[in-house]
Image (cartoon, rainbow, N blue to C red):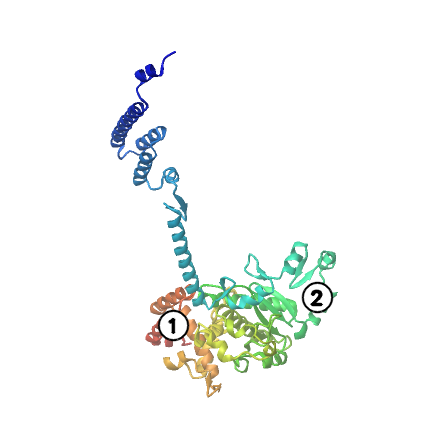
Amino acid sequence: MYSLLLITSLLGAPDAVASASHAALTLQDDDRRAEFDEKRAAAKGDKEALWEVHNWCSAFGMEREGNSILKEILRLDDEDARAHELLGHVKYDGQWFTTEKKLEAYKKKRAAAVERREREEAEAKGWVKYKGGYIDPADIPFLEKGWSKNAAGEWVDPAVQQRLDEGWKRQDMTWISPAEFPELESGKWKVGDTWMSIEAADIAHSVPDSAWMIPIDSMVVHSTLPRALTLDAGDHMRRSLQEVRRFFGADPAGKFQVVLSRSIDQFSEIATDNDLLGMSSVTWAYLGTGTRNEAGAVVPMGGGYWDVEGENGAALGNHSVRLAASFSFIDAIDPSPQAIAPPKRKSKRGEPVSMQDFLGEKRLPLVLSQGLAVYGARYFIDRAAAAGGDPFWARKWSLQNLQNQGGLRAPALVLSFPFWSGGEISPDAGQTLLEAGALVAFILDGENEAVTTAHRAWKEVWNSGNDLEAATQALFEAVAANWEAFQAFVQV
């Protein structure tokens, strides 16, 4: 057995052994570091070679050196995901963040920017904050009732959605259960709880309290006309709106309401309580705001008539229903959400809408909103005119009426739309409406380069939701500067 003295003499004292071992390791580290420097220098600028150096570092536990290589790789290719991940970077929103602190700072800054942009866009549209988001004030009653929008952007009652899920069908706006499908398929119509022939149903729906409710494109038409005549009127309205929407280059969101009466007496009775602007006393239609929905919000409705028994029923009805639909369309695309919102107190739900409040929310000046409605009713291009017919027949008739009433007045007077005088409807209200319709016709169809350019710019601002005042002023200035061309346009 070796003695402790012999072992010590052979191996050396413990401190000496440790010192020798440390010296050897230090020498080895220096050698590897030198080798690393050589490899790094040789791989400079070569991504694949640098990855080989990184792998070599990993094999020898050289973490610090390996990380420096990863950073060099990222200087060559900042999108190298593996290098980012090995360095512990986090990718978010298409960017790499080197620390969680920097990521959180970015998220907060981004959230603040999004909130600011949403607030500015909402304020420009007249929206309000509601439960953490921004919405149209007119949507609040539906949300309070638990409704939701479907794919078409329409508000849907959960009960309605349930019926759809259960296989029910709609006959116009009336729900039909699967058990009643045989009656539906036989050609009958459901009125209340009774199934009737179309002739009997037309009679039942001939009074305002039980009018037909027929969806036609973007409209829901409340009509006391026979159903077939309502559909014919719907064709006239649809064609009119094709012309009106050209002014905006856009459509309203959701459906809007139109009321059609079967006689002048029925029309006058409804207009007495609903006509907001007094149009029914001057022309054959009006915009009504006397109806409220279940939530208490006002439902604006354009109203017109088609005399089913009068000799001139079709001739006058054609223009009346077009004007009614145009009123509804224009109000729907340029609404007054605060004026029509449900009153905070139920006791006020029967009070009429203030005309001043209603008009005060509009983006369109009256000469354009009313002129557009008149354009849709009396200055439209009849694109359904028979072969050999004159598609401008309505415009020529309206321009002749304008000439008979004194013709086109001065620019400042026409653009100011003097429909009222001293709080009453002006004696020249008819001329004012015809001038406004002619103005819109000139803007849309006059082929005047300056006016067309100004209108194109106006549409861009309209559809952006930005303030319209400057664009409208520029459009009016273009018209005024080309007044002689406008005067020539209205000659017949």
Q: Nearer the viewer, residue 409 or 339?
A: 339
Q: Find residue 465 and report its horizontal and vertical position in percent.
A: 42, 65
Q: Looking at numbered disc 1 in the image, what kind of residue is underneath it? A: Glu
Q: Nearer the viewer, residue 465 or 460?
A: 465
Residue on which the image places disc 1: 469
Please, what secondary structure does the residue beneath circle 1 have? helix
As drawn, which residue projects farthest toward the bottom? 422
> How many marks do you count on the picture?
2
Q: Residue, x 37% and y 81% (percent of image)?
A: 412
Q: Nearer the viewer, residue 173 or 98?
A: 98
As drawn, which residue projects farthest toward the top? 1
Q: Residue, x 55% and y 58% (percent of image)?
A: 152
Above or below residue 138? Residue 161 is: above
Please, what secondary structure does the residue beneath circle 2 have? helix
Residue on which the image places disc 2: 198
Q: Is any atom of residue 360 visible in this view?
A: yes
Q: Looking at numbered disc 2 in the image, what kind of residue is underneath it? A: Ile
Above or below residue 270? Residue 91 is: above
Mark 1 Cα shell of 10 Å, populated few (<14), some (14-19), many (≥20): some
Mark 1 vs 2, N-terminal side: 2
Q: CA distance from mark 1 to mark 2?
A: 51 Å
Q: Nearer the viewer, residue 268 or 306?
A: 268
Residue 461: quarter of image: bottom left
